[in-house]
Amino acid sequence: MGNPPLRLDRSGLVLLHLFLRTLQESGAGHIQYSVPEETDKGFFVGNISKDLELEPWELSERGVRIISRDRMQLFALNLRSGSLITAGRLDREELCETLSSCFLNIEILVEDTLKIYGVEVEIMDVNDNAPSFQEAEIEIKVSEHSTPGSRFPLPIARDPDVGMNSLQRYELNPNSYFSLQMRGGTDGTMNPELVLEGSLDREKESAHHLLLTAFDGGDPIHQGAVAIRVVVLDVNDHVPKFTQSVYRVSIPENLRSGTRVLIVNATDPDEGINGEVVYSFRNTESKTSEIFQLDSQTGEVLIRGSLDFEKHRFYEMEIQAQDGGGLSTTAKILITVVDVNDNAPEITITSSTNSVLENSPPGTVIALLNVQDQDSGENGQVSCFVPNSLPFKLEKTYGNYYKLITTRMLDREQVHSYDITLIATDQGFPPLSTETHISLNIADDNDNPPTFADSSYSIYIPENNARGASFFSVMAVDRDSSENSQITYSLVEDTLQGAPLSTYISINSNTGTLYALRSFDYEQFRDLQLWVTAQDSGKPPLSSNVSVNIFVLDQNDNAPEILYPTLPTDGSTGVELAPRSAEPGYLVTKVVAVDRDSGQNAWLSYRLLKASEPGLFAVGLHTGEVRTARALLDRDALKQSLVVAVQDHGQPPLSATVTLTVAVADSIPDVLADLGSIGTPADPDDADLTLYLVVAVAAVSCVFLAFVIVLLALRLRRWHASRVLQASGGGLVGVPASHFVGVDGVRAFLQTYSHEVSLTADSRKSHLIFPQPNYVDTLISQESCGKSEPLLITEDSAAGLGNLDSTNNQETPRKMSHNRCFLGVVISN
């Protein structure tokens, strides 16, 4: 075949191809193209981007690719132009062998949508093959006694092209003895036969040389020839004859090598060597001779190679029987291969993802797969499924393609990965099945907020805690993974006692550990509530809050505080007075103390720690009342020093002490006479100064007492004259009881006992009486100090003053007044 004719032929086919492709693209259904065979690599097949309704640049962006099995080497995608091109030389005869129409089906996958488009490409035949005979020369033996009209089979030429490009006719070179006739075969093929036209004479011509030529119908026409040598034999009356002109047999494809398929038999009634028949294959393709073997003596046809229904389903062979005289005859063997379920289904994962986001909607595509079974009929019918226990199913999409999709939303927190088993089973007997596995990880979605173990926490912290020390840790759990489970802790902004909460409490943002920035004081606040926020790092972030209640526990950190008696702010020392006539149980004073703690830390008990006269005074354990334990005796010292301890019940217990000075005296002069001895200077260096101060106070007190007596005498005198005596009494009553009597820091004040003053006209009969104690507490109101009673004054006393009643000679005592107040002495230190 010359090059120029071939180029012209290809040019015409290309035009035809473009025309047919235009017609095919106008139709509905899958995409159809056509391309002539024997084109160069990169030949344009079709505009795939246009047919997919995509722009050329979208092919790579959307992952468009060819996924057809065993066809990827034939075609390729030009991602720049968006066209489908040939990947190499296409040989129609190699791809489709003897099929009249050659269609190649490929699938185009759009990766981002996992959508498949079917593309059918027709390979158009080009007259690139000439008819050819299997042998270059054949020999036919004919008996000289053969009658005219006898037929002798001739070899068949083969042309792999189809249509007009295939074998169309035979021609025999002109001669006087033989002609060419065609006999139709069972499969529609033309079988040439040599027909004897006249009688043969071996003595004249023992051999005849003929030429058989085969022609195709292409443009240009190709031809092939075989030389025929006809040998004229001596007397051989009979030609071998087969028992059947056509032998038909069906065999399963799983027969082993060496298995007998059938036995052909031809008989020849001649005797001797002319009756011996030898069998051989004639006009048999090389592939057939590789599969089958013929025993030339017995006529047994044996399996030589491996049968495969999926590759060759039918074999046609011509067998020749020739006797020893050279006469021969032919018969045909038609072998049909029966499919056996010897191929298990094949599962090919075309596209898949190893991870899918949880909460993806049902119907999300996980994988695209192809299921094939090379068997036919029921043996090739395949059902593919996924176990029902998994939330996946298979849906058929295009041809033998299935997509694996989800049946419901997936939850990574329940199942974080799946090992999906795909099972494909055919309908053969016995059925064959195949399994394949797809591992799928469930990618996390931030669908779970952090959660705390409890809805709220209660924490008890002793007061006086160390600053900066951790006291509690909160922990939240996020069931998500990676960044979605990374938790950050924070405090919700708030204030406490006017200050930001962050100045009291801080939290470690990574661990949730709470730290006290201050030392808590139970006396300032006893509890506080704060909110802790746990937030993950997902997008968008999710968070949750938990309430933390902090209760401050009281510690025994406050000693009892003495409220009474209190030391004067000017540094002087207070003195409590007790009359010598006091009975046992007389209330001298009461120690009042408080503790700022609470609970048992604030339970106070009082006890007498030290006394200058043991057994004279007693202190109430729970009341703090200082009472006389026995009657006062004359030998008891004027000044009694008591040390009272106040102790709480904390652990360890804290205590406070107070020193009480109690002056024991029946009259004010007695008190004033011994005031100097009451002072207890704290510093020895100040002893002399204190002594001087005491003497000065005593002198001033005596002057004051004398002044009071004189004043009273004057008042009585006036009363006698004009009943001023009552006014004088009223004037005494008018002296404030809170006034102190003192000089240079020594002050006498009425606080501890009551007295009555009775005056008569005779000053010698005037006297000061200390009544029996009648108070239960030394903390008295000012009203009691202002209470007055009339003084008793006799008439003699009135007459002695010069204002006596002439009608009354008896001394009639009269009450002037008597004031009840408390007397105390304060000595400056």
Image: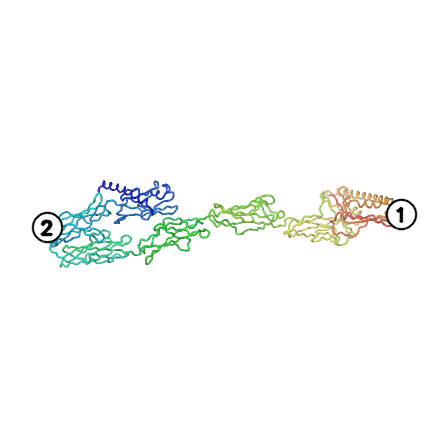
Residue 675 vertical placement versus 278 (above, below) = above
Mark 2 is surrounded, within 10 Å at the Cα level, by few (under 14), some (14 to 19) or many (20 or more) other residues, namely few
Residue 90 vertical placement versus 391 (above, below) = above
Which numbered circle lies on residue 603? none
- Kindly state the secondary structure of the residue where label 2 is placed: loop
- Between 625 and 97, the residue placed more toward the observer is 97
Question: Which residue is outermost to the left?
Answer: 203
Residue 316 placement (x, y as % from top left): 23, 53
Which numbered circle lies on residue 805? 1
Q: Can residue 783 be spotted in the picture? A: yes
Q: Earlier in the sequence, mark 2 or mark 1?
A: 2
Residue 240 placement (x, y as % from top left): 16, 57
Quarter occupied by the C terminus: top right
Q: Quadrant of residue 342?
A: bottom left
Residue 507 placement (x, y as % from top left): 54, 46
Q: Amino acid at mark 1?
A: Asp
